[in-house]
Image (cartoon, rainbow, N blue to C red):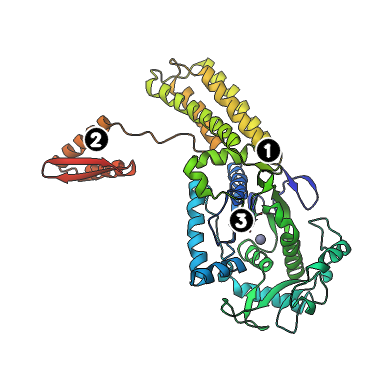
Amino acid sequence: MKIYNTLSGRKEEFQPLEEGKVKMYVCGPTVYNLIHIGNARPMILFDTVRRYMEYKGYEVNYVSNFTDVDDKIIKKAVEEGVDASVISERYIAECKKDMEAMNVKPATVHPKATEEIGGMLEMINTLIEKGHAYRAEDGTVYFRTRSFKGYGKLSHKNLDDLQGGNRSLLVTGEDQKEDPLDFVLWKPKKDGEPYWESPWCQGRPGWHIECSVMSKKYLGEEIDIHAGGEDLVFPHHENEIAQSEAANEKPFARYWMHNAFLNINNRKMSKSQGNFFTVRDVSEKYDLQVLRFFMLSAHYRSPLNFSEELMEAAGNGYDRIVNGVSNLNYLLENSKSDKISDEEQRLLKEAAAYTAKFEEAMEDDFNTADALSAIFELVKFANSHAGAEGSREFLTGLKEEIKELSGICGLIVEKEQELLDEDIEALIKERQEARKARNFGRADEIRNELLTKGIILEDTREGVKWKRV
Ligand code: AMP
Ligand code: ZN
């Protein structure tokens, strides 16, 4: 499996630290608003990476944080006259709803910055002890950037160029820095802001330190993959490397993966620029499975422009797979043959070539566009070889292969069959008979089965009534 590593600037063969296991950290959103579809790009992409790794048999420990203390969260809390935690908890809950709606699996752990302050104090302390950080007069703690020899290795920046560029960025209090390149680990509180006690001042952590600390706590000092959008390469990930490697004296992450931007009118979609669509907005117009298909239709390192035309095309592509599966289901329901023929066996072997093609695409730095093409070819193959005479085993084989590959992409391509009215009536009749025979177990089972399909039963004096929810 080859992964493009931002650190080396080339594709590398993936070698996990520990056989059969993957430790992966993905920087998550700052929670002060509903997430937009730019934020959804890394979520969908890295969820797909994770699903593929799991399909290959790896046990994936996937950690993704919520940044729940930040200027923007505090500003919103002040505007609404509530505690910062009210804002962050609200948007964490909303973000989780969106993730579920996009079929993004929950991370193994979703740590929150505010719950990891102890670990941050500890790491900052270690950095001070090792001479990599210092306290300025006002209580701010800075990382001494030049003390870390590898600084710039991820973003391929040269320290002296950075120094020139950074001078103009001086803001109040920064004149206390030893060097303009130094960045904040801990900063003093301002009036009305949430704060924590620390040996340096009452205050709160800088943004970068949280990921170094959470990654260490939940995955260990060395991890396999660290990921996020390309805007995080510098300074966020560069600073994370400096903090983690200076504190732990071990290499931090082996592979750094970065997705390119989701754009709108060829400009980065971003909350601060106001040019964004939330996942919620998009869900009103499109099935979020179509959004997922759209995201995977381009390579993750290429910019992707959001447009109605591309979403239409994604909708057609997704429907093609769904229709292929529903066609197989129809044939399966009407199939008269249990025995697979020799010819069908040969065809199933031929169909396995599409799985091989899919894997080849995914193993070439997660080329999801080509992987989706392999699924299309498989659907086309199924459409042309599956007919009314098909055996159940053959039809099921084709269907399962399409479902498995689509599932790796997080695409749900088999819609729950809706129960027809007569099926519901028949089940209700069976339930009545079970109750008469005092077989309450079966009666409850039927009630629950109907409930999971959205049918509610009501026992009334005139008999059983039902409705769809
Ligand atoms: P933020 O909440 O801005 O810290 O972003 C959370 C994640 O979304 C980070 O990995 C960002 O790099 C990523 N991200 C934000 N905007 C975009 C965009 N327009 N396209 C792709 N990724 C983005
Ligand atoms: Zn991070």
**Of marks 1 and 2, the one in the foreground:** 1
The residue identified by callout 3 is: 271
Q: Is the CB atom of the residue marked by disc 3 within 8 angstroms of ligand 1's nearest atom? A: yes
Q: Residue at x 14, y 45 (%)?
A: 460
Q: Residues within 10 Å of mark 3 (few under 14, many from 20)?
A: some
Q: Residue at x 63, y 75 (%)?
A: 204
Q: Is the CB atom of the residue marked by disc 2 within 8 angstroms of ligand 1's nearest atom? A: no
**Mark 3: amino acid:** Lys
Whichever of callouts 1 and 2 sits on the residue coming sooner in the sequence is 1
Whichever of callouts 3 and 2 sits on the residue coming sooner in the sequence is 3
Which residue is most to the left?
A: 461
With 150 as the anchor, is 38 left or right in this view?
A: left
**Mark 1: amino acid:** Asn
Between the residue at mark 1 and the residue at mark 2, the CA separation in whole angstroms equals 46 Å
The residue identified by callout 1 is: 367
Quadrant of image for the C terminus: top left
Between 283 and 140, the one lying in front of the other is: 283
- Which mark is drawn over residue 62? none
The residue identified by callout 2 is: 427
**Ligand 2 quadrant in view:** bottom right
Secondary-structure class at tag 1: loop
Q: Residues within 10 Å of mark 2 (few under 14, many from 20)?
A: some
Q: Residue at x 20, y 35 (%)?
A: 430
Q: Residue at x 62, y 29 (%)?
A: 374
Between the residue at mark 1 and the residue at mark 3, the CA separation in whole angstroms equals 28 Å
**Mark 2: amino acid:** Leu
CB-based contact (under 8 Å), mark 3 and mark 2 = no
CB-based contact (under 8 Å), mark 1 and mark 2 = no
